[in-house]
Amino acid sequence: MKIRVFISSVQKELADERLALQILLTTDPFLSEHCVPVLFENEPAPLEPNPWAYLELLENCHVYLAIVWKEYGVKIDGLSATHHEYRKAQEERIPSLITIKGTNTLERENEAQDFIAEIRRDGHTCDRFHTTEELQQKVRTRLIRHIKEQYHVGPTSEQENIARQNIQVASAFERQRLDRISWQDLDHGLAAMLAAKAEETEPGSLTSEKIISILWTRGLLWKAEQNQFLATAAGIILLANDPSAIFPHTRLQMSAFAGKERTHKPIDHGTIRKPLAKAIDDAVAFVHRNTRHPLRVVGLNRVELNEYPEEALREALVNALAHRDYEDAGRRVTLDLFRDRLEITSPGELPGGLSLARLRSGQARSRSRNPNIAQGLVLLGRMEERGTGIQRMMASMLDHGLDKPVINLIDGEVTVTLFGPGEDLERIKTPSNVPGIVSPAMEAKLNDRQKAIIRKVLTDGSVTSGWVMRSFGVVKDTAARDLKELCNYSLLEQKGRGRSVHYILPAKK
């Protein structure tokens, strides 16, 4: 069971802080395992009017988290909703975490000052903050302390380092609440997939209302007036059909060149204007279309190889799109494909003082400018959660028979270069787990002549009964029987008539 953290504040005044805490509780590597944010405005409306529904919701929570700033809020029976929630938490003895924005000398409404005074009289320690990042840090520290005391579990050193670095380097870009794209205009298929993964259930099991609730809780939607749900910047980039309609710099520019140098006339080029998960898939397809795929005979199978390992390509694309500096609106991610290499360039310096040497070593810990976008890609199955992408990219290239990726930082852009095999396609190693036309179970049914026949077709493209007779010294009936059985197994297909009869691999269906 997860700890339900009730977030209480004047909603409009502290909308950004509320969103920042939602993102913290759903993306932090430790807190996301143990906590879930609860906000009253995310709850479905009751069938009958109930002015105290928010207090009933609070009764079912485990931690009360208040944020106080300048305003007191609209009064209900003499007190604001936040004040009512605070008193209810004290009455129910719910552990309370109080945060106050600004200094003691900040000018506040009189009722807000009185509210703070009451909190102090009750003996609570209040955490003061000035920025959303400082709020996240203080709330995280207090919640972890509470979880350790009550449940005797705490974050690992890796979780601690990742969380602190992410808070320090995270950009405010993805938290923007924009009024440009509503829930109705998003890719509902992707939204259902993301929400289902977050809830560890099947996409078809969730109603639209539940999907909206999950996306809202995770900071991908925000609630405007008249209960209209709109996409945040992170929601637009992950789920909008064309994010570039709002953010032109999110377009992915691709070019393929015939030689080793960039020219004014590429052999293929394109611009992707899709949500990140689909953009990654389209970019992989572009590279597949513009690279070589040598065929290799392995056992009784003919295997089509890729010039670049797909895992390394996807990791390079994911890193570029998930961790780029989205506040730099003047540059975009680019993919340039040459005869001997592939270059992916991403705008932005290395986050959090990360050194280039540390990044190249593959030992750098994950630091994300855009933790909510990165978490979305994890839930959509395009990104690993543990932040070991560079290591996996290096291992994938080496396993493919190629050199390690080269990473450079030039003019505020990170470029990852994957060097291909050049003209020596024999460098490419055959994966040990590639599927083929002959399964192990089928291979067990074949005699030695039939296995040799399959290898002959894989190498030369066809075989005749005459070749079988000459190669194995068998009579015509034996050769015909071997070939007929292979056709019955759908491993070969007969072509031609009379003396022109030959056998080839069956056409793919």
Image (spheres, rainbow, N blue to C red):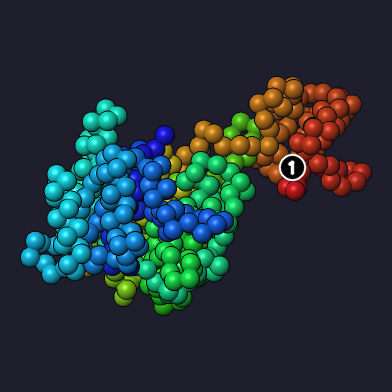
The vertical placement of 155 against 10, above or below, is above
In front of the other: 157 or 120: 120
Residue drawn at (52%, 33%) of the image: 432
On the image, the x and y values in percent for residue 32 come to 36, 43
Residue drawn at (83%, 29%) of the image: 485
Q: Which residue appears farthest toward the right when viewing the image?
A: 498
Residue drawn at (51%, 41%) of the image: 200
The vertical placement of 94 against 206, above or below, is above
* Residue receiving disc 1: 505
- Left or right: 64 in relation to 214: left
The vertical placement of 412 against 443, above or below, is below
- Left or right: 144 in relation to 42: left
In front of the other: 200 or 316: 200
The vertical placement of 388 against 9, above or below, is above
Crowding near pointer 1: few (<14 within 10 Å), some, many (20+)?
A: some
- Left or right: 228 in relation to 475: left
Q: For residue 99, say whether it is visible.
A: yes
Q: Which residue appears farthest toward the front when viewing the image?
A: 77
On the image, the x and y values in percent for residue 286 come to 52, 61
- Left or right: 396 in relation to 456: left
- Where is residue 41, by image quadrant? bottom left
On the image, the x and y values in percent for residue 351 come to 22, 56
On the image, the x and y values in percent for residue 81 come to 33, 59
Q: Which residue appears farthest toward the bottom when viewing the image?
A: 264
In front of the other: 424 or 310: 310
